[in-house]
Image: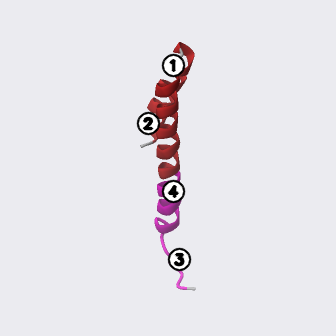
Amino acid sequence: MLRWTVVFLIIAIIAAVLGFGGVAAGAASIARILFFIFLVLFVLSWIFGRSPNKSGI
């Protein structure tokens, strides 16, 4: 999913340089949404992916 965020960010930068304002804004907003989804999934997998304490304390 992070790969798609980078792809849309690059599309937004290229479109902004070429002067396509609507395309750049759309790609940037998609990249922003995908980044936040990736961030939430990363935090959730970090929290729930830890193994329990094996010492039983």
| Amino acid residing under circle 2 | Arg
Find residue 2 and report its horizontal and vertical position in percent. Answer: 46, 41
Disc nearer the start of the sequence (4/3): 4
**Tag 2, which secondary structure?**
helix
Which part of the image, by quadrant, shows the N terminus?
A: top left
Point out the stretch of residues depicted in magenta. 39-56
Vertically, is 24 above or below 38? above
| Amino acid residing under circle 4 | Val
**Tag 1, which secondary structure?**
helix
User: Circle 2 sits on which residue?
Assistant: 3
- Residues 10 and 29: in front is 29
- Residues 26 and 40: in front is 26
Disc nearer the start of the sequence (1/2): 2
User: Circle 4 sits on which residue?
Assistant: 40
**Tag 3, which secondary structure?**
loop
Q: CA distance from mark 4 to mark 2?
A: 16 Å
How would you rate the neighbour count of disc 1 (Cα within 10 Å): few for under 14, some for 14-19, many for 20 or more? some
Disc nearer the start of the sequence (3/1): 1
User: Circle 3 sits on which residue?
Assistant: 53
Give the foreground label among 1 and 2. Answer: 1
Q: CA distance from mark 2 to mark 3?
A: 34 Å
Q: CA distance from mark 3 to mark 1?
A: 48 Å
| Amino acid residing under circle 1 | Ile
> Magenta stretch: residue 16 in it?
no
Disc nearer the start of the sequence (1/4): 1
**Tag 4, which secondary structure?**
helix
